[in-house]
Image: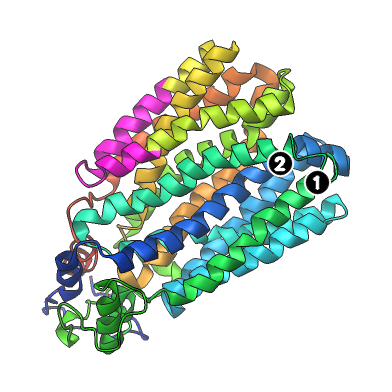
Amino acid sequence: MTAVTSSTAPTTSPAATPRNGVATALDSIGFTRAQFAVLMLILAGEFFDTLEQNSVGAMATNIKASLQIGDVQLTTINTATVIGGLVGRFLAGWLADRYGRRFSLSLNLLVYTLGGILSALAFNYDVLLVSRFIVGVGVGGEFMIGIAMLSEMVATKFRGGLIATINVGAGGIGNFISYGLFLLLLGPLAVPLGGDHVVWRWTFVLLALPALIVVFYRRRLPETPRWLLSKGRVAEANRSLAILASSSLRPAADVKSPIELTEADLPPVALHSSPAAVFHKSVLRRTISIGIASWMAFGAQVTLNFLMPTLLVERGYTVSQSLLYTMIMNIGSLLGCTLAALIANSVGRRVTVTTAGILGCLTALAFAGFGNSTGMILVLGALFQFFTMVTNTTLAAWTAEVYPTAIRASGASIVNGIGNIAGAVMPYLAVALFGAFAFAGVFGLAAVMYAILVIASRFAPEARGRTLEQVNENELTTATH
């Protein structure tokens, strides 16, 4: 099969083998202060992403009472956010592959801030629905673009652990802190902030405005050397490597790259830099495998995080109790993604996803059968969140590793967007199952989803311990000639 070459990037002879100098250079510098600063700036945006994802579910009772809406309309608000996230993922992935990771990452937070402020000002259900769609567009591409960016800027031996660290801060600490924050705002601070009918508006403001500070500091981020090389911009790639090898994002102008890249390091281009290339037959098996796994993993996570406070309230717990219990369950989230980060550099992606997926399935079945008392709800809920975050953290890192540089952002965003679609669809089914079978219906659904995830993950290529070029450009170029 003849490779499909890009009109916007350099091509190399099929027989040519690049030096992979960019991987060698990054592997030689270890983990620097500049790379740590990159990690923190990406992590900050992901943290706000997590707060936003949990906000409507946590404030469900307040929003329903203030706007006089029911569970179906509330679920539709979540769906609007998820659909916005889907649009945002696709758009952000295309922008990141075409104009750079840094540009796309900063634009995401600006749109998110606009949507958050509009949510606070929403005077009726329709305006809130539109505002949450805008928020979804803003935060939609944040997670996967950040992961794709970091994966292209760090050494091979640290890549899995550092990418997983993003989920420790966002999915782990973020999930835990978010419900603590909402418990504080909707509890002791509710009256000072205007009472139950107004406090949710101030909460949206408090989530939106700090993101502007992150946007300001993200101006200092360098573009990734791999993306620059994919566009033939060798001199800029060398400058990016020099920054990453230094102790600051603003090093002296005479700082040099640890290995001087040349045109011999340009990657072989096997695919167009376009979202459609994610479905090219050379990578289609990867897209199907990771796509199905994402649907199951992220669909289950979004559904349960969104519905859990409401499910607890409808079982007789107070709003404060539901938020407190959900926060306690998310201790499992923090521990799960922390474990995933600790083992990412030593345990293969496939083994981790398969093991955690099986245990998550069994835990969901246990919850369906025995999640009746408060103690069992807390224990099994935390345990399920633990395995969920081990699975999702590893899967997120894996997603960013299985596409060539030319389509890495689009590929990661589209595959993650498949999970986003599940987050829009599955809550409706979960609500129906809860009405018919209580917790057994919701967690029975989660168990089935995890069983399918385990099967799908068997067909994606292993990436641990291999450079991105070995997994992608070199392997795919060899396979297409």
Front one among 93 and 339:
339
User: Does residue 113 show up magenta in the picture?
Assistant: no
Q: Are marks 2 and 1 in contact (CB under 8 Å)?
A: yes
Q: Residue 159, percent across and down?
A: 27, 56
- Check disc 2 and give the amino acid type: Leu
* Residue that label 2 marks: 185
* Residue that label 1 marks: 193
The tag earlier along the polypeptide, 2 or 1, is 2
Q: Residue 67, percent across and down?
A: 87, 44
Display colour scheme: rainbow
Q: Is residue 431 visible?
A: no
- By secondary structure, the bulk of the magenta-drawn segment is best described as helix
- Locate residue 138 relative to residue 292 in the image: left or right: right
Q: Residue 453, percent across and down?
A: 39, 37
- Locate residue 296 relative to residue 285 in the image: left or right: right
Q: On the image, which quarter does residue 339 sit in?
A: top left
Q: Residue at left 85%, top 37%?
A: 65
Q: Which residues are magenta?
A: 337-362
Q: Residue at left 68%, top 54%?
A: 206
Q: Where's the N terminus, which quadrant? A: bottom left
Label 2 secondary element: helix
